[in-house]
Image (tube, rainbow, N blue to C red):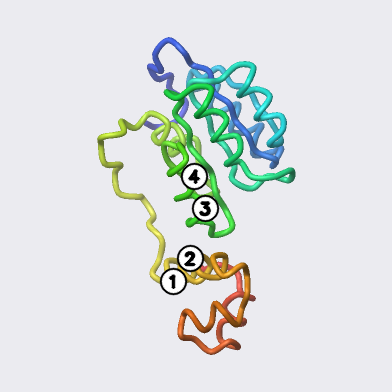
Amino acid sequence: MTGNEMIDLGEDKSLLLVDDDEPFLRRLARAMEKRGFEVETAGSVAAGKAIATARPPAFAVIDLRLEDGSGLDVVELLREKRPDSRIVVLTGYGAIATAVAAVKIGATDYLSKPADANDIVNALLARTDALPPPPENPMSADRVRWEHIQRVYELCDRNVSETARRLNMHRRTLQRILAKRSPR
């Protein structure tokens, strides 16, 4: 898929986009409309849940962390209202563990931000029994290590001493790693 071509989405082309990053939400909505989706947007968990309840869409792209809570609440509600809905969760903040939780409660897939419209469409339309193609730009070994450390840190309720103990790492070394930005 190169860009703005229309794709066969079947009968129901409804798509719910939930993200509190307003410029990103507008750009993504335009890109998805050009690809044939009938887009509704929400900037919060509350607005996303309201749309999911009133008009459960065939497709949804939901940000994991929103100002008023977790996008997982919208995923759960949508899965309840429309079990056949194809849901992609967007995640930043190195929250791979949470993204895995999203898949367990009913998301079809998850993508790391920033994700482009083509990646999102491919994830939304992927057959569930087919293996996805290998990523164009997979995470570096440094990034995988950083993600693992972040996951253990979150599982230890952000307790640096406990995380350092479980990772068999000096506490100061861990603090330095946590203070840095994530590697590419």
Q: Which residue is mark 4?
A: 102
Work out whether mark 4 precedes mark 1 in sequence or the reverse, and give the earlier one: 4
The mark found on residue 145 in the picture is 1
Crowd tier of the residue under label 4, counting other residues whose Cα lies within 10 Å: few below 14, some 14–19, many 20 or above = many
* Residue at mark 3 to residue at mark 2: CA–CA distance: 11 Å
* Residue at mark 4 to residue at mark 3: CA–CA distance: 6 Å
Q: Which residue is mark 3?
A: 98
Mark nearer the viewer, 3 or 2? 3
Work out whether mark 4 precedes mark 2 in sequence or the reverse, and give the earlier one: 4
User: Of helix, strand and loop, which one carries label 4?
Assistant: helix
Residue drawn at (48%, 56%), measured in percent from left and top? 96
The answer to the question of whether label 4 and label 1 lie on touching residues, with beta carbons closer than 8 A, is: no
Q: Is residue 10 above or below residue 156?
A: above
Crowd tier of the residue under label 2, counting other residues whose Cα lies within 10 Å: few below 14, some 14–19, many 20 or above = many
Give the total number of marks visible in the rendering.
Answer: 4
Along the line of sight, the residue nearer the viewer: 12 or 71: 71
User: Of helix, strand and loop, which one carries label 1?
Assistant: helix
Left or right: where does residue 44 sit relative to residue 64? right
Mark nearer the viewer, 4 or 1? 4
- Where residue 174 appears, as percent x and y from the top left, is 56, 82
The answer to the question of whether label 2 and label 1 lie on touching residues, with beta carbons closer than 8 A, is: yes
The answer to the question of whether label 4 and label 3 lie on touching residues, with beta carbons closer than 8 A, is: yes
Mark nearer the viewer, 4 or 2? 4
Residue drawn at (53%, 57%), measured in percent from left and top? 95
Kindly identify the amino acid type of the residue bearing the numbered disc 3: Thr
Q: Which residue is mark 2?
A: 147
Name the image quarter holding residue 5: top left
